[in-house]
Every structure is written in C-alpha cells, then in structure tokens.
Amino acid sequence: MKIDIKVPEVGESVQEAVLAQWYRRDGDMVKKDDILFLIETDKVTLEVAAEADGILKIVVPEGATIAIGTVVGTLDSDAAAAGLEIPVSAREEKKAATEAPRMERLEETYKTYETHKTYNTHETHETGGSESAEDASLQTDLSPSVRRLIAEKKLDASKITGTGPGGRITRGDVLLYLEESATAPKAVSVAQAPASKATEAPPAPDRIRSEEAVTRKPMSRIRQRIAERLLYARQNTAMLTTFNEIDMSRVQAIRARFKEAFHEKYGIPLGMMSFFIKASVAALKEIPEVNASIEDKDIVYHHYYHVCVAIGAERGLVAPVIRNADQLSFAGLERAIADYVVKIRENRLEISDLEGGTFTVSNGGIYGSLLSTPILNTPQSGILGMHKIEDRPVAIDGQVAIRPMMYVALSYDHRIVDGREAVTFLKRIKECIENPERMMIEI
C-alpha cells in the first residue's frame, strides 16, 4: 500500500509553505516517526515525520513552494514489509533527474572552481583535503547527499556555515560554499606563477571592485513575514515610546536567595521574565487601554491577559503567547517560557502558539542592549522592552549609591493610549519590580 505524504495544515491563515529540506533520500527505507522533511511558512517552521514504515519516493524537490495539503512524496509500506528497497541505480537516476536543473546552473561554476585548483598546488590543504573529507563523512548530523558532495569536492565541513535546523549543513550550503570558492580570487605567489605574471602590473581599482565578493540569499518566509509586520506597524500605527529606569536590587536579592529552592521544587530556574510578566499584568489591569486593540473604528478591550514573550530563533524572532498569564504562578510562567524555547528549537511551534496575544514583553538585554524603542506587535497596542542590567550611580536619600539599574521602554499606539496613561503604566511596572514582594502577595 502506498501512503501519500502531504504538507500538513498549520493554521487557517497559512495557505502555502516552502519545502525547505528533505532529510531522507529518494528510495530510502524509513521508519514510522522518522523526520522526513522540513517546511517553512511565513510564521513557523515545522518538521514532518513519517506516518508508517515504508520506502520513500520523493515527488516534490527541495526549495519548491507548495500549497497546504500537497502530496510531496509517498511511502510504499508493502515494499517495506517485504524487505524490498529500490535499487541503488534507480535511486541515483531519480536523484540525478531531480537535481539536473540545479546542477546545470552550477556547471560553469564548478568548471571555474576546478580551473582555480590547477593554479594552486596547495588547494588540497586549503579546502581540507581528503582527510578532512573523510572526517566530514563521519559526521552523523549530515545527510547522506551532503556527505557525498563534501567528499566528492574534498571540502572541509568545518568551514561551511550551516543554515539548517540547529546549524545543520544542507546541500544548498555546500553548493553556495562552492560558488563562493569559485568566485573568490586565489592568491598566487611569485614562485608559483609563471615568470611573465611576476612582471604584470597590479589590477586596476575598477577590476578590484568588480571582484569584491558578496553573498546573496533569499529571505526566508518567516523573515519576509517579520519584515511585513514591522513595516505595517510603522506605517499604520501612531507609535510612540516612553522610558523609565528600574532599580533591580530587590529582584536580584530574591532570585539569589530562593533560586536553589525554586529549582529544586519546580525543576526550572527562576528567571527575570516572570517578574516582568507579573508586573505587566498588574499594570494592564490598571491601564486597560494598553491591553486593547483597534478594529475598524472600534476599540476592543480585552478582559484577559495573553502575554507574548519575544524569543530569538534561528530563523527569526517569534513571540509565542502565554495565555491567561494572570492566572499563572512564577513557576507556571517560567515553565511556559521554557516549553516554548524547546518547541522553537525542535521546530514544533504551532500557529496557535503565536495567535491571540494582547501585550508583548521583549528582553533585548540578553543580547547586551542598553536602550531601544521596540516596535509594536500589531494589532496589540503596547510592547514592553527590557534591557541589560548595569551598575550605575544613583541618588538615594540625598546620597550617591551604586545600584544595578535597567532602562525599560514602553512603545504604544497613541491612537488608543495617551501619554499620561503610558507613563502611569511604566511607573506601575517600576513600582512592582522595585517592590517585588507586593506582586507575590498581590497587593
């Protein structure tokens, strides 16, 4: 029996996806739950697993844009049960037919690459040599096709930048590396070059500029979507940002005092984000306009608190939603964040994880940002930006003291939120963080 392999539905708003990478080759025997391929939409990336044991037949190649529900391959479960496998020769013919257009485009590049090799007797050393190729072939995180290509071209896998999940090297990464190697000018010493070359004049400046290397990569679907949303927010909201600074001494003291007991009881560390989510919920309850949104000519006030947490991912920034954050404890919030980090790393994030948020918290401080103006996550009307904690001199009771301080920023839609409300909102967060005990007993 042949089982169709289809692109799964990932949300009502998603109609198409890019088949980013096949993890198995045409003709491979696969087991149930083996990861077959990776799809990329404008919101999430998702790994698709086999529904049964079978011999894989690939119908749609990597890089193709297909509609949701499209059959991209089949599994022959009868052949698997009989212990059969497609002959290697047939598999290679199918593979060659699939990659023919791609290889034709790179044929001239490869010729140029080989030509460069004849002018440099140290090429084997520079590209890693056969020994490095053998090491690369032993890496278990490379697909068979990638290992074979690296071995054929005698490349050093450690010099190739991987763009697949978890930094995995894809076939496209290898081909791009070959293109760049072919176009990059090779250094030829006077001793190696013919005698006539030693007396040649240096290349003209215009020629040098024409040979400057560039790398061109298509924007991923997620990056395109991020760009569209950010541009929309800038063009369609009256966005304004207000700032304040917070003394983080009390929060740091609480974390230092209870971090071991917290981790022992709940199995997760006590982070900084849960304090700011708690403080944000308290401020949202006091200033409901920041938790509202505009639909046509109406202001929609949300009587629930679905807080988005911005998380940096390999393919772009995503902001999954912690639903009913007001009903969760510190441990519940930290666990929700940790679960999302794992889902993002394993490409298991679903569309439902990203929809329905009413407010966003983003921590640029983990990257070292001292101050920024975050852009609204539309249709939301507010986003809180956290930043790095830095010891600074501050005036306390008429005396100068050194305190761990953090700048915070609230970007808001001025169509809904007035300046007075925005400043009051941020002051409320400051009060909660500087007196965290109040949040713990809900005063």
Image (tube, grey):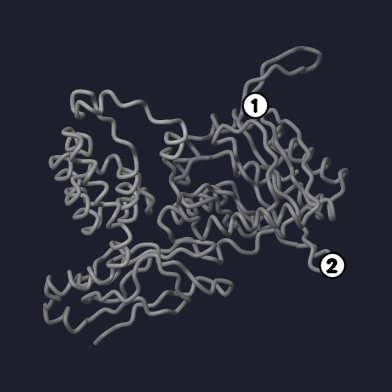
Identify the residue shown where x is 71% and y is 55%. 233
* Residue nearer the viewer, 433 or 413: 413
Pointer 2: what residue?
298
Q: Quadrant for the N terminus, please.
A: bottom left
Task: Name the one closer to the observer, 184 or 384.
Answer: 184
Q: Quadrant of residue 396?
A: top right
Q: Which residue is mark 1?
A: 249
Q: Quadrant for the C terminus, please.
A: top right
Left or right, 133 with reference to 291: left
Q: Is residue 113 left or right of residue 322?
A: left
Q: Position of residue 348 (x, y in %)?
A: 44, 61
Q: Nearer the viewer, residue 347 or 279?
A: 347
Name the residue located 43 percent from the left edge and 31 percent from the top edge: 204
Mark 1 element type: helix
276 versus 163 height, above or below: above
Give how far across and how far down residue 316 sits, in percent.
52, 51
Q: Position of residue 16 (x, y in %)?
A: 50, 72
Secondary structure of residue under mark 2: strand
Give the crowd class for mark 1: few <14, some 14-19, many >=20 residues within 10 Å: some
Q: Residue furthest bottom?
A: 1
Label 2 crowd bin: few (<14), some (14–19), many (20+), radius 10 Å: few
Depicted 217 relative to depicted 93: above or below: above
Going from the N terminus, do you reach mark 2 or mark 1 first?
A: 1
